[in-house]
Amino acid sequence: MPVLTLPELELYRHELREAGQTLVLTNGHFDLLHVGHLDYLEKARELGDALIVGVNSDASTRRLKGEGRPIVPGIERARLLAALEPVNIVVIFEEDTAIRLVETLQPEIYVKGGDYAPDQAMNSKPLPERPAVEAYGGKIVLIDYLPAHSTSELIRKIKTLQNS
């Protein structure tokens, strides 16, 4: 599966619409790819006919996750994701949110992890893309993460090994 630019992706989106297919869009850093990512992407793909994955660029990941991140460069993260069976297309984006991706592609379904709030509730992260999805009538689906499977947890384990 290819890694495309946003203009190339717009053509793919047009083809999906013409064929009456449902587009699912998700996005994230996907640094240190692990089985939790795969589980999440498999569940996202089951929701529609095609799954596009937006990958935060290296600069965006550094701004959001801090110095030392990403561990894996963006083009490599994108290539790994593009090789996964549930993923149709991958795009790298520079912004800190996927609002521009959502506005441009207008997926029927926008998927994020269960750490986001379904209704901007307290004690969970607000979903910055929510207004963009709601503006065109798209659907937001939150998928629970596989417990104890996160990049942050992997980094902690690696640091523990390094210190022993």
Image (cartoon, helix red, strand yellow):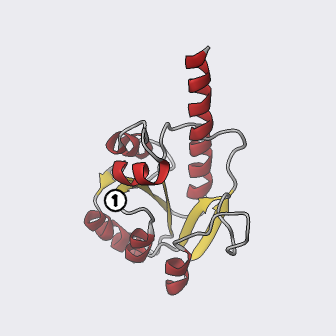
Looking at the image, residue 16 lies above or below residue 151: below
- Label 1 secondary element: loop
Looking at the image, residue 43 lies above or below residue 163: below
Image point 33% across, 50% down: which residue? Answer: 2
- Tell me which corner region of the image, top left, top right, bottom left or bottom right, holds residue 156: top right
Q: Nearer the viewer, residue 65 or 53?
A: 65
State the residue lying farthest toward the top. 164
Residue 38 in percent (x, y) is at: 57, 43
Residue 55 in percent (x, y) is at: 42, 53
Amino acid, disc 1: Glu
- Tell me which corner region of the image, top left, top right, bottom left or bottom right, holds residue 111: bottom right
- Relative placement, left or right, of 148 versus 26 is right
Image point 37% across, 70% down: which residue? Answer: 13
Image point 69% across, 45% down: which residue? Answer: 146
Looking at the image, residue 83 lies above or below residue 137: above
Residue 79 in percent (x, y) is at: 36, 42
Looking at the rendered structure, the number of numbered marks drawn on it comes to 1
Read off the residue under disc 1.
94
Residue 117 in percent (x, y) is at: 68, 67
- Relative placement, left or right, of 15 versus 163 is left
Image point 49% across, 45% down: which residue? Answer: 30
The quarter of the image holding the C terminus is top right
Looking at the image, residue 22 lies above or below residue 40: below
Mark 1 residue crowding within 10 angstroms, few (<14) / some (14–19) / many (20+): some
Q: Nearer the viewer, residue 43 or 70?
A: 70
Q: Nearer the viewer, residue 88 or 150?
A: 150
